[in-house]
Amino acid sequence: MKLTISQIARLAGVSKSTVSRALNGSGYVSEVTRRKIQDIIRKYDYVPDSKAVSLSKRRTFTIGLVLPSTSGPFYGEVIRGVEEVLSSRGYFTLLTVLDSGQDEVRARKRYLSAIRERRVDGAIIFDPTIDEETVSKLSRCRMPIIFLLKDFQSLGIDSVVVDNLSGSVSMVNHLVEKHGYRCIAFIRGPEVSDDSEERFQGFVESLKRHGISCDDLPVFVSNFTFEGGRRIYKELRKFLHRLDAVFCANDEMALGIMEEMKNDGYKPGIDVAVVGFDDAFWAGHIEPPLTTVHQPMYEVGKISAERILDRVESPDVFKDPVKITLRTRLVVRKSCGC
Amino acid sequence: MKLTISQIARLAGVSKSTVSRALNGSGYVSEVTRRKIQDIIRKYDYVPDSKAVSLSKRRTFTIGLVLPSTSGPFYGEVIRGVEEVLSSRGYFTLLTVLDSGQDEVRARKRYLSAIRERRVDGAIIFDPTIDEETVSKLSRCRMPIIFLLKDFQSLGIDSVVVDNLSGSVSMVNHLVEKHGYRCIAFIRGPEVSDDSEERFQGFVESLKRHGISCDDLPVFVSNFTFEGGRRIYKELRKFLHRLDAVFCANDEMALGIMEEMKNDGYKPGIDVAVVGFDDAFWAGHIEPPLTTVHQPMYEVGKISAERILDRVESPDVFKDPVKITLRTRLVVRKSCGC
DNA sequence: AAAATTTGTGAAACCGGTTCCATATGTTTG
DNA sequence: CAAACATATGGAACCGGTTTCACAAATTTT
């Protein structure tokens, strides 16, 4: 049966204020009473109710974490990074996943309401398809918020992003300089994806720098999924004979394409290079091992958590919104022909 | 600036009780006042503070979810299942990951304290290495709790488990009946793992049923990781010439073994069958595609969440502790020789 | 030794809601 | 038309803590 602070106070023969002070180590409590209270607490296994503490302290010691999904290693890494710093600093993690259930819009409403009803002290939001309207509403909540892989600095919100562009550039540099490939197809993700866009820009930029015109290079739009990759292969097929390489905006699509390619009798990495972006857990273990661009998702999680706690714990300090950019890293394996 | 219910009451010219009733649709409120209050609320964008609501309702509308890790597709599936039902029923998910940070013991303490301080209304716990002592303490908290893949029915706690034994049996049946293999090695997980133990039992049982003695079959102990699989290959190697198949207690170890096997010039699936357990996301995409046993982790998450909410929402109803067993499914691909 | 300061404690207000109860009015029912 | 009941509302207690403040006792400073 749950005890309250008043009952403990009565048992110890003191007032609740004294118990509270003993509990928090705040204010004055004599050594004798402290000990007496400690004994009672231990004896009855008393634990203060977090709801009451939160209400009077006006803090929940909980940080919201919003992720688009939990499939793939990607998001797991973010969680790991976030959880590591939050838990080590005494905070809890309230998780919302956008793709659970069918309705992303509903999921978004739920995390927004968690923020507005102050269920959390701050939030780390990874929501690629959120609109500016919603974000600017959010920014008016005066709640520490940080966005992942999405830049809203102009709206006064912190963000941690990853350098897609330079990742893409170094991939193309490798394909062109090391292998001498010149005819490279690009498979984009969904139109709305900033990641897809930036990776494509890096592709274009690097080719331009090498004096390769990308006007007549085949570019396809898909959806970042394995199935999407398989489907796009049907169209890609026609170009295959004159292609040196296929650069996919993520690993899953690369996997789908390689799969179909093999079914079709081509050898990815030998007949045509296929490379990806993300460095998924399995990327090094498929056949052929995938050359890709590693994204430091663990660091993204970690740094965003640190940043949000700084904001939460010193809300008075005025700080400009920051955009922290983390570097990507080219991971050369075999599917590029190496 | 955050408004309180009192300020809304003042603005609407009514008492807080009336506002509260209008908000919750409880008790009587005339259509006129209801409308007036609604208008004020909308105008000032008022949202009740969840901390206060939780305190007075004595419910947090939050369920704790504890996972050993977030790497691998496994846990992501659990999260998806849990989140789907929790969010659709208006609950939030408080996540604790045991392997974030370095200290599992500390992580365990944290989730236990979240439970004891009633930060959650109930908890879904996936903690393979928890000891009975702790569990029995937990069971005294009078908080709805359900364990995943760990049976504590005897201590009066619900659990959702997966039928490892019959999964293992059907795998061995396949290897023996379909392929005629008789000399099969088994790679266990950590000694402490119940999963590993049950899968091994299934292996033994099925062999026995086929009249195959497993006394002189090679059995190794590893640790469920990719690296562990690679390491064990060094020992496995000596037996390889007389082996028909290697049955790994999970997919990651199978992957590690196949990797080393290939480096060593053997063709897994052709020279020796290699099969796993778990059906990880990538299992079908590696070379050769892995024959394995699928575990319904999404369902595990979903069912456990449904069960916990039933307990939370009707705590008065007496129900015996249940153990729900979900069936596994053999997934035949190519690494078994098919 | 008086004044000032530090230490120890409890009463009461507060955090921001919900809920019980009393009261007032409007409607039915007998 | 009085009694019974449904409707509408506000006051006050309550959820379980924290924190401010007042006050007394013990210590230190002057």
Image (tube, coloured by chain):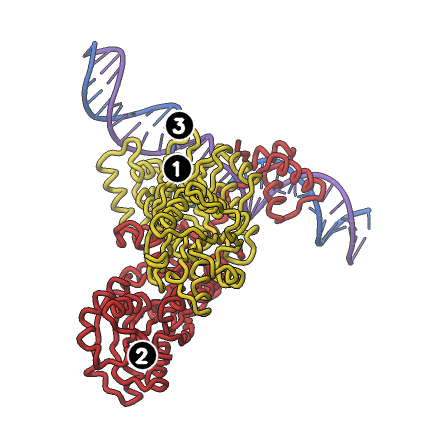
Chain colours: A yellow, B red, C purple, D blue
* Mark 2 surroundings within 10 Å by alpha-carbon count, few (fewer than 14), some (14 through 19), many (20 or more): many
Name the mark nearer the viewer: 2 or 1.
Answer: 1
Is A81 drawn above or below residue A258 in the view shown?
above
- Please, which chain is the residue tagged with disc 2 on? B
* Left or right, B185 with reference to B118: left
Which quarter of the picture shows residue D30?
top left
- Both on one chain, marks 3 and 1? yes
Q: Marks 2 and 1, how far apart in space?
A: 51 Å
Which quarter of the picture shows residue B7?
top right
How many marks can you see?
Answer: 3
Q: The residue under label 1 is which amino acid type?
A: Ile
At numbered mark 2, what does the secondary structure look like: helix, strand or loop?
helix
Residue pointed to by mark 3:
A317
Q: Which of A269 and B91 is in front in this view?
A: A269
Q: The residue under label 3 is which amino acid type?
A: Val
Write the residue at 42% across / 61% down. Answer: A255
Q: Where is residue A59 in the image (x, y as percent from the top left)?
A: 42, 39
**Residue A248 in view here:** yes
Is B191 drawn above or below residue B208 in the view shown?
above
Residue pointed to by mark 1:
A324
Q: Marks 3 and 1, how far apart in space?
A: 19 Å
Write the residue at 38% across / 31% down. Answer: A314
Residue B202, which numbered label? 2
* Mark 3 surroundings within 10 Å by alpha-carbon count, few (fewer than 14), some (14 through 19), many (20 or more): few
Write the residue at 37% across / 76% down. Answer: B167
Q: Where is residue A175 in the image (x, y as percent from the top left)?
A: 38, 51
Q: Quadrant of the N terminus of chain A?
A: bottom left
Q: Nearer the viewer, residue B36 or A107?
A: A107
